[in-house]
Image (cartoon, grey):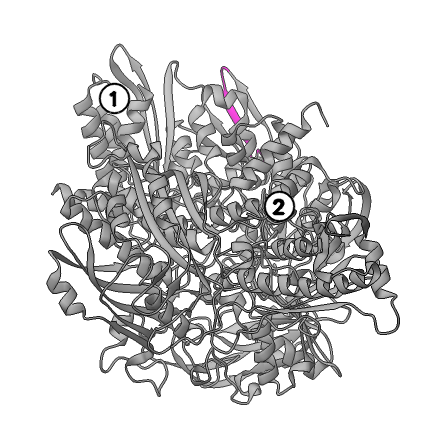
Amino acid sequence: MEEYSVIGKRIPRVDGRVKVTGEARYAADYSMPGMLWCKMLRSPYPHARIVSIDTSRAEKLPGVKGVLTGKDFNGWTWGWMPKTRDEPPLAVDKVRYLAEAVAAVAAIDEDTAEEATELIKVEYEELPGVFDPEEAMKEGAPRVHDYVKNNLSWDFHMDFGDVDKGFGEADLVREDRFETGRVITGYLEPPAAVALWDSGGITIWAAKQSPYFVYRHLAACFNLPLNKVRIIQPFIGAGFGGTKNDSLAGDFCSVLFSKRTGRPVKFVYNMHEVLMTCRRRHNMIIHNKMGMKKDGIITAMQSKVIADGGAYTAIGPLTMYLTGSISTLPYKLPHFRHDAYRIFTNNPIGAAMRGHGVTHTRFAAEIQMEMMAEELGIDPIEVRLKNAITAPYETINKVTVHTCGLKEGLKTLSENPKWKKRSGGSPPEGPLSHGVGISGTAYLGGARQRGHQSCGAVVRLCEDGTIDYLTGATDCGQGSDTVLVQIVAEELGLGVEDVDIKRVDTAVTPCDAGSYGSRVTVLAGGAARNAARDVKRQLAEVAARNWEVDPGDIIFKDQRVYVKGEPEKAMPFRKLAQVACYAGSGAVIIGRGYSQYGIEELDFDKGIGNAGTSYSFTSQLTEVDVDLETGFVKCTDMVIAHDCGRPLNPINVEAQNQGGAIQGMGQAMYERFAMDLGKTLNANLADYKMPLSTDVPNIELIDIITDDPNGPYGAKEASEGSTVSSPPSVVSAIHDATGIWFKEQPVTPEKIVMALKKKRE
Amino acid sequence: MAMKKIKFVLNGETCEWEVKPWRTLLEMLREDFQLTGTKEGCGEGECGSCTVIMGGKTVNSCLVPAVEADGQEILTIEGLAHGENLHPVQEAFVEKAGMQCGFCTPGMIMSAKALLDENPEPSENEIREGIAGNFCRCTGYTKIFESIQAAAEAMKGGK
Amino acid sequence: MVTFYRRLPKMGYVKPGSLEEALELLEKNPNGRYRVYAGGTDVIPKLKGRVIQSPEILVDLKGVSDLDHIDFDEQKGLYIGALATVRSVETSPVIKERYPILSQAAGSIASIQVRNRGTITGNICNAVPSADSAPALLCLDARVLLYSKNGGERTVDITDFFKGPGLTVLQPNEILREINISASPENSRSVYIKLSPRSRMDLAVVGVGVLLTKTNGTFRNVRIGLGAVAPTPIRALKAEAMLEGSEVNDDLIINAARTASEESRPIDDHRASAEYRKMMVEVLVKRAIHQCL
């Protein structure tokens, strides 16, 4: 193994200091002289025709500078694919979910803007709504979009091998219905932006984890060339997919108000607005069927997924793709059939969230596999080891795995003393029952998305030997800026303090798809390395000329440059930078790099090929104490054995795994939107229960090093993997404590008590 | 509904100011004083992002009418460091990766500071209780516990 | 129409320097023109969300001196002033020692930040059925002292104070000046158990307070207070009567717990079903009694 100076070290975050002092500025922290405030008026009905809108009273309120309605956008709509552009900035003819934006006000301050929204009169004709996807699929159900039959937003099908043959070969076949729950990303920073339209076009300071998506949306909406749309990235108060990967009513309205008034325009959503109207994880009903031989070998799996898509398509087609295409990992599946249906309803919009698509179907398959193992008398780890893939491996749908640490992870956990504490069904003495659960899951890293593959880096050498590093990749909190700086520093033999990473500015930084699908370290990391190597190559030529040696013999290390085997031929990096930059006219050292990993085509319609560049594997042990009388669950411990290839910054990888696992635990134990006829009943942080400091377990982390060839320095993804592994592991532990299999998330105290009562009766 | 005159000490400096009675302390800090380190998450006292120390006690500044700052001593995240020198709690959060996106961080650090002022050697359980009013969605809290423990260690002997 | 407000409605603010001055304002208080607040942790979010009618003027009680007291006297018992914060009640040494149930209940409310501002009197004046301090105060036979203009003063037993969700006997011209609790019976033991999905920062799905004395193997001075299982916090009087004077035994405890459950009248809502709440009353009353033995 090569010895690195910066890579693999526990280096504190490069943005740590500005974040602990309060200096780091987030979108809502920006303000400008003459700035207006934009406020949305939203619909009180989940499904209604807009008969008329009278904005005259609002316009007359002193301080109001403009009012917008859907018609002001001239019929423009956006969506993830050309054929799914179904979402307008403001509702035009009808509203399709409760609190959809119907109008917007710009005023001199936010108080006035809020007051003015009360003066807008909208006449609605209420329409019957549909809120249950299974109801919405039926003939005669109300249509959310008039042109869409049976409310089918998107469907996706895979059929590999012969599932009937597979089930025929099985000794045991089970069919179960699972439901994954209505949860939301849970970032604490409500979306916000300040938009400015001037002769240079649009400039917007907006909280976006994929700024280049919004850049395309704004260019299309306002019919501007891309070089007139500038998105400047503030710090981002977390993303976790969905809303901050996308555009919002507030973005479009602020920009249009700025165009009309010539003044900067700001909006900030509030937390109720986030929890009621922003994109959330799809709730999915999964009918899963699995066949297994007596010895625990899986013979076939068939899944039918019905996803509540809500009112618009958003990124839903990719969600559906991921529910199936990754189901063939991490256990061998000789026969597999998958039918996924995304259904429009009058609920808020379903979209991407950490563990995108995979967490749903993997939860169903993991639990069902363990239920069957239990019926066959096979240990939960044993059944996983029997079916787990080993690298190299190609699945039936041609997903290629070069490295896989699953078996090693599972074996490590099986030897952990905590695993020995399993109750295995023996009843406790008091009301408190201890349980230990397990899971073994996979997730893709370096996600590639149709048409948005671009990923580059520019490394500019300053004449004093410091480095300006430009990337379009977005750090929304995960720590990627630090890892990317480490990569640039490592290549050039510098320290992280010598490299400055600039925040994304679409006018300056190279195009990138942003933060989703665990792609930044793998893809932007590859680009950063290549750009740094380009600079190194140029500098090595200068040094080689200077010392009359071969450029291949120039070594960059510890902020110095020297010739291999000739220690007297050496100079500080700073000195070489000066020599290179002053060596005649035109001597500007700029390095360019692109990610070159995994660029083969995938078949998006059939689910064939690699949606990821590489795949991470997570084995997780979870311990819980369940109060059998109250149903209260305390998650006490987790042990996570994670194969991220190689941790480039171990402290950061630990932090990602801890955060991801706790987010998954929230989904498994606490979090759910209570809905009634399209209304979110618990749109506040007291009632939408995310884990707090007093709820989280002790977490032990184990790195399984596999050094993947398709990642910088062997790295794969870290973080989404543990969001996927956590729910089945928690539910497996609750089963161990209670003897009951829960197939719907979250497993609340009430569900536990009622299930135990039913079992007794 | 006249403006109210108030006088208070903000991060060690005496301020005289006029505020509308319907302004919150959070709005005054962020909009009038440009102290945007204090964040607004939920705006209703549930997330803890807006935590500041008023009269030696942590409060959700989103729930405090700005006029109530009158006569008070207020400390925000911007007032913790001394010039280039970070407060030990800030230092520990950097070293131990106690933050990710950083949005909850100012409020979290204020809660941690108040905890350590009151209880210089907290157990892990006391740390958990001390920051139970501050959500963090990124870290899963473990690294925050470690940061606060490290800060307590560093502050031993009244440093 | 739906607007998600971030700003408070426009209103005035006064900070009277004395209770008389505050009561004077309330006396001429048509249509809720004035609204009194202490900590503001409840009223401010409600005003932001336009959940309650905006007053023209907020009346900040914190200008009134001598209202943040926590005083104890062996004869008169405990006095908690209208401005005593939840946190000060939670951490008060005398309350911890003499009335641990109240200290526990106070400590289970929201966050430290909220407890540093919010008051115990505010907690009961809001009269949410799940108010954590209420079962404790019910167990302690607390009395509330309500003042009005010109020396108007009345004392109301806590059992008569709550009238419905968000409703109390407090009149628009009155201020709850203080809470009085007699010295607890000697050797009494008490506990408050709160059940919620999360460990902290959560609303009680069920809250149970129990106070009792065990004298020569029999139950004495039994009080059972229940939160979040009826339109108001309630006492489980039948269960108390079953235990009072009876010999301590497990079957009796089980029966009393079941009786308390039957006395509860919870509703189904998005937090829990009525059936679950009733079941939990039984479990928690049983546990609380055992913890007091």
- Relative to A259, residue A331 above or below: above
- Relative to A687, residue A415 above or below: above
What is the chain letter for disc 1? C
Residue A633 in which image quadrant: top left
Q: Which quadrant is home to the C terminus of chain A?
A: top left
- Residue C86 in percent (x, y) is at 53, 35
Nearer to us in this view, A264 or A377: A377
Nearer to us in this view, A243 or C96: A243
**Residue A117 is at least partly visible in this image:** no
Mark 2 crowd level (few <14, some 14–19, many ≥20, 10 Å Cα)? many
Nearer to us in this view, A44 or A515: A515
Question: Which residue is located at x 60 percent, y 73 percent?
Answer: A116
Residue A549 in which image quadrant: bottom right
Question: Which residue is located at x 43 percent, y 85 percent?
Answer: A83
Q: Name the amino acid type tagged 1.
A: Glu
Asked whether, in this view, residue A120 is left or right of residue A404, the answer is right
Q: Which mark is residue B107?
A: 2
What is the chain letter for disc 2? B
Asked whether, in this view, residue A173 is left or right of residue A589, the answer is left
Q: Which mark is residue C244?
A: 1
A269 in the magenta segment:
no
Which region shows up in magenta?
Answer: C74-84
- Residue A138 in percent (x, y) is at 23, 78
Residue A212 in which image quadrant: bottom right
Mark 1 crowd level (few <14, some 14–19, many ≥20, 10 Å Cα)? some
Nearer to us in this view, C205 or A485: A485
Q: Which mark is residue C85?
A: none
- Residue B26 in percent (x, y) is at 66, 52
Marks 1 and 2: which is nearer the front? 2
Regarding mark 1 in the picture, which secondary structure is present there? loop
Question: Which residue is located at x 54 percent, y 66 percent?
Answer: A244
Q: Residue furthest bottom?
A: A74
